């Protein structure tokens, strides 16, 4: 197995929304805000080479957005795009055999579809891939609640449903040897997080359970989470496990750090231990 970090671009979200009830003087130590109170966000995906299969975990925001959307979220694709990152590794989107979507918020699955050349409809981007999604999450996304509805875009989801490429899962599973999918329900219903055996270590694709290393302290829960108390319960379960087993977190949204480990300091708080590039493992 080989793992590669795939940078698909950057965007910005409101820092207050990203850290919930935590005061700005605390969260801006690790995630500085711009003059509109927005913090830098990566859209970092993971490419997994294993035998004859090529897995992509999430795929960024895509390129279907208009100018208003781009300005609102400060979308930046000048440096990194999914296609450029794949090309740098000698791959093309048609080489992808499987796409694991942690969940169907626009910044995680927007690259799944694109405009048809006629601009009359949307088509699936990865023509040879199966898309793996939790069944209960798909149902949740197709019937969104008012709090979360702005994160689900029909054009990102409907083409997958109408294709023959969608594969639905019911709960935690071992997708193939060395790749387990864990399920958490605080941020959204049935977010699935890949746990990968790699070079004698375990790597957890942190998704939106731990969006950045600045989110490691237990109360640092996003305002976007639909069940914030559940998120805290899940973190309270995961954090000791991360420390005890020296699990490596792969950060999807941290604009400054790819990977890291967790420690418990002398006050009993969970904080970042080390940060490093995936290629350094």
Image (spheres, helix red, strand yellow):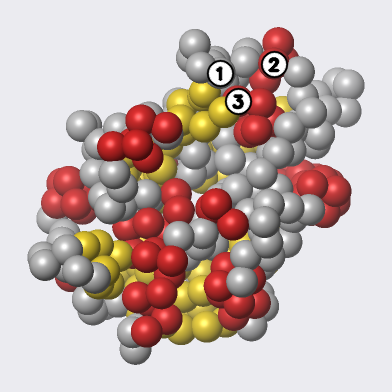
Mark number displayed over residue 209: none
Mark number displayed over residue 37: 1
**Mark nearer the N terminus (3 vs 2):** 3
**Mark nearer the N terminus (2 vs 1):** 2
Q: CA distance from mark 3 to mark 2?
A: 8 Å
At mark 3, the secondary structure is helix
Q: Eyeballing the image, is 171 above or below 4?
A: below
Which image quarter is the C terminus in? top left
Q: CA distance from mark 2 to mark 1?
A: 9 Å
At mark 2, the secondary structure is helix
Residue at horizontal 46 percent and vertical 26 percent from the top: 40
Residue at horizontal 42 percent and vertical 81 percent from the top: 161
Mark number displayed over residue 15: 3
Could you tell whether 156 is left or right of 259 in the image? left
Could you tell whether 204 is left or right of 79 in the image? right
Q: Quadrant of the rendered structure where residue 224 is?
A: top right
**Quick one: 199 or 184, which is closer to the camera?**
184
At mark 1, the secondary structure is loop
Q: Eyeballing the image, is 27 above or below 255?
A: above
Q: Are marks 2 and 1 in contact (CB under 8 Å)?
A: yes
* Residue indicated by mark 2: 24
Q: Residue 245: x percent and y percent?
A: 70, 50
Q: Are marks 1 and 3 in contact (CB under 8 Å)?
A: yes
Q: Quadrant of the rendered structure where residue 172 is?
A: bottom right
**Quick one: 87 or 38, which is closer to the camera?**
38
**Quick one: 149 or 249, which is closer to the camera?**
149
Report the residue that reaches farthest toward the bottom: 164
The image shows a total of numbered marks equal to 3
């Amino acid at each position: 197995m080989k793992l590669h970090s795939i940078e698909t671009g950057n965007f910005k979200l409101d820092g207050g929304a990203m850290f919930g009830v935590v005061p700005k003087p605390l969260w801006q130590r690790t995630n500085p805000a711009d003059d509109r109170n927005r913090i830098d966000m990566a859209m970092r995906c993971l490419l997994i080479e294993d035998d004859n299969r090529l897995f992509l975990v999430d795929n960024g925001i895509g390129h279907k957005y208009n100018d208003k959307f781009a300005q609102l979220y400060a979308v930046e694709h000048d440096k990194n795009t999914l296609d450029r990152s794949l090309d740098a590794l000698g791959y093309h989107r048609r080489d992808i055999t499987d796409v694991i979507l942690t969940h169907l918020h626009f910044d995680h699955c927007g690259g799944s579809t694109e405009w048809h050349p006629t601009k009359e409809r949307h088509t699936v981007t990865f023509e040879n891939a199966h898309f793996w999604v939790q069944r209960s999450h798909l149902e949740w996304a197709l019937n969104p609640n008012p709090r979360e509805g702005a994160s689900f875009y029909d054009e990102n989801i409907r083409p997958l449903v109408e294709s023959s490429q969608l594969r639905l899962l019911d709960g935690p599973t071992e997708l193939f040897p060395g790749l387990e999918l864990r399920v958490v329900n605080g941020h959204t219903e049935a977010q699935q997080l890949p746990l990968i055996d790699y070079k004698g270590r375990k790597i957890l694709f942190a998704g939106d359970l731990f969006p950045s290393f600045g989110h490691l302290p237990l109360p640092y829960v996003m305002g976007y989470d639909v069940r914030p108390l559940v998120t805290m319960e899940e973190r309270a379960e995961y954090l000791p496990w991360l420390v005890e087993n020296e699990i490596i977190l792969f950060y999807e949204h941290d604009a400054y750090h790819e990977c890291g480990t967790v420690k418990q300091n002398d006050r009993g708080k969970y904080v970042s231990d080390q940060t490093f590039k995936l290629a350094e493992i």
